[in-house]
Image (spheres, rainbow, N blue to C red):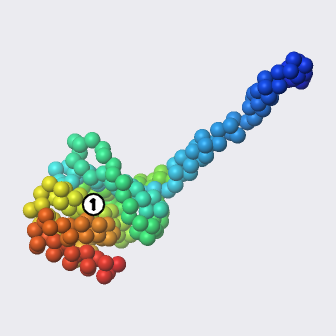
């Protein structure tokens, strides 16, 4: 009623522009908040979906070893983070892309272990300290985890090997990038280790190295031996994958 009275008064005074402004203000006032902020609503829904996506985290803590701390977190799509460091260092998660196929294998093995719900993997025998390993499953408000020093459980051992191989791969890749930038004479030693890891099938996603191997093999700033080794390794990886 108030709006109709105001509209009539402004029309009689010939203030059509003011009338239009009043109408726009009235429409905004009665419209729902969600209609006025669609981007914010969509962003909230997106964040909620991301938070609800299931994730699996592997953590290994082994003081005085190298490295002392490893944490790898993955989701079902194959993306995630890794954090490999000394215990005294500040957390520094880095992006990780292991691919959907490997992620599906990880989640399948976790499913065999009931997503770690009520699962005891420890061997419960006197054995040397090999570092505390933890598997953690999270999905929305659901959360299950289990920790162990050593296990004989086959799915758990397979899962442990995948995560430890991923950690090894990221350290190899980090060393390759570091030596390519700061220690060109040391590149060949790193390549020898990567080649050995690849030969023993310890690199879960070896195609991750191809970009750097190609770059190294074509750069005459590196010694010929390193360039040849990089080209040979890249050829083997492509042939197998």
Q: Is residue 59 left or right of residue 23?
A: left
Q: Is residue 46 left or right of residue 60?
A: right
Q: Residue at x 13, y 65 (%)?
A: 222
Above or below, comparing residue 98 to residue 1 in the picture: below
Q: Quadrant of residue 24?
A: top right
Q: Residue at x 16, y 75 (%)?
A: 228
Q: Quadrant of residue 72?
A: bottom left
Q: Quadrant of residue 209?
A: bottom left
- SS at mark 1? helix
Residue 131, given in percent of the width and then of the height, sits at 24, 55
Whether residue 147 is visible: no
Residue 181, given in percent of the width and then of the height, sits at 18, 56
Residue 115, given in percent of the width and then of the height, sits at 46, 60
- In this view, the residue in front, 5 or 83, is 5
Q: Is residue 81 left or right of residue 184?
A: right
Q: Residue furthest front?
A: 14
Q: Residue at x 70, y 40 (%)?
A: 35
Q: Residue at x 36, y 61 (%)?
A: 121
Whether residue 215 is visible: yes
Above or below, comparing residue 77 to residue 18 in the picture: below
Name the quarter where the N terminus is drawn.
top right
* Residue, disc 1: 170
Above or below, comparing residue 124 to residue 85 in the picture: below
User: How crowded is the residue under tag 1: few (<14 C-alpha within 10 Å), some, or many (20+)?
Assistant: some
- In this view, the residue in front, 56 or 38, is 38
- In this view, the residue in front, 126 or 60, is 60
Name the quarter where the C terminus is drawn.
bottom left
Residue 133, given in percent of the width and then of the height, sits at 31, 56
Q: Is residue 23 left or right of residue 142?
A: right
Q: Residue furthest bottom?
A: 239
């Amino acid at each position: 009623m108030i709006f109709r009275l105001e509209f009539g008064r402004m029309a009689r005074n010939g203030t059509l522009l003011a009338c239009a402004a009043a109408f726009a203000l009235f429409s905004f006032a009665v419209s729902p908040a969600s209609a006025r902020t669609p981007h914010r609503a969509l962003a909230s829904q997106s964040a909620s979906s991301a938070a609800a996506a299931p994730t699996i985290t592997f953590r290994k803590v082994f003081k005085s070893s190298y490295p002392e701390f490893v944490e790898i977190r993955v989701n079902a799509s194959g993306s995630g983070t890794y954090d490999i460091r000394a215990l005294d260092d500040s957390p520094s998660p880095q992006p990780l892309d292991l691919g959907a196929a490997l992620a599906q294998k990880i989640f399948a093995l976790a499913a065999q272990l009931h997503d770690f719900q009520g699962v005891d993997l420890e061997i419960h025998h006197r054995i040397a300290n090999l570092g505390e390993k933890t598997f953690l499953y999270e999905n929305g408000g659901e959360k299950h985890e289990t920790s162990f020093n050593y296990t004989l459980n086959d799915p758990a051992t397979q899962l442990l090997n995948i995560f430890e191989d991923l950690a090894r791969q990221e350290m190899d890749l980090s060393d390759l990038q570091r030596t390519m930038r700061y220690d060109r004479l040391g590149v060949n030693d790193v390549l020898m280790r990567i080649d050995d890891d690849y030969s023993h099938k310890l690199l879960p996603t070896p195609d991750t190295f191809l970009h750097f191997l190609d770059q190294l093999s074509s750069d005459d700033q590196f010694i010929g031996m390193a360039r040849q080794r990089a080209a040979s390794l890249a050829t083997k990886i492509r042939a197998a994958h």
